Image: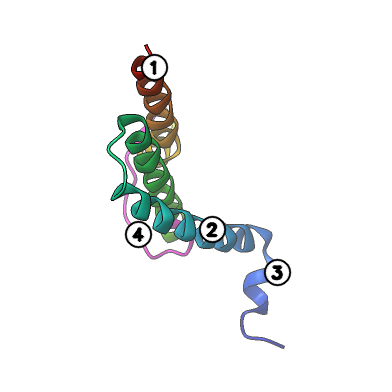
Amino acid sequence: MSPVAPLFADGAVFELLVRLTLGAITSFLAILCWTRTRNLSWMFVIVGVLASYAGTLYRSLRFFGLFPGAEIRFFGTSLALLVSENLPIVLFAGAFIAFLRAER
């Protein structure tokens, strides 16, 4: 039996590892695109992708117990999780707004 088999027995761990892998590839490509663009809407998209990956990293560190400590609670939920889940959406909305304003 493989030593990593217990990790893949839990579906949440496998899902997190796949998300980390795909997020790392996407973040690498976003950083490559960052050096080639000056368009504000694309900059918002790139920062949104990087914020999404940072949120995934935070969730994985909390899941594996590598980021212990007290959480700041906001309306019954973790403030860090609330920000990491919603910041990419806000940045993508900013990208759409910047694109629409540039098209006038």
Q: Which of 95 and 14 is in front in this view?
A: 95
Cα gap from disc 4 to disc 1, whole angstroms: 46 Å
Select label 4 or label 2 by which is in front: 2
Q: In which quarter of the image is the C terminus?
A: top left
Is 76 inside the magenta-drawn segment?
no
Please say which color scheme the image uses.
Answer: rainbow
Task: Work out whether mark 1 precedes mark 3 in sequence or the reverse, and give the earlier one.
Answer: 3
Residue occupying image coordinates x 37% and y 42%: 46
Identified by mark 2, the residue type is Leu
Q: Is residue 94 above or below residue 85?
A: above
Identified by mark 4, the residue type is Pro
Task: Work out whether mark 2 precedes mark 1 in sequence or the reverse, and give the earlier one.
Answer: 2
Q: Nearer the viewer, residue 59 or 39?
A: 39
Q: What stretch is highlighted in magenta?
A: 62-74
Instruction: State the predominant SS element of the stretch in magenta.
Output: loop
Residue that carries the numbered disc 3 in the rendered image: 9
Cα gap from disc 4 to disc 3, whole angstroms: 24 Å
Asked whether the residues under the numbered discs 4 and 2 touch, taking CB atoms below 8 Å apart as contact, a structural biologist would say no
**Within-10-Å neighbours for mark 3: few <14, some 14–19, many 20+:** few
Identified by mark 1, the residue type is Glu
Residue that carries the numbered disc 2 in the rendered image: 22
Cα gap from disc 3 to disc 2, whole angstroms: 20 Å
Select label 2 or label 1 by which is in front: 1
Residue that carries the numbered disc 4 in the rendered image: 68
Residue occupying image coordinates x 59% and y 61%: 18
Task: Work out whether mark 4 precedes mark 3 in sequence or the reverse, and give the earlier one.
Answer: 3
Select label 3 or label 2 by which is in front: 2
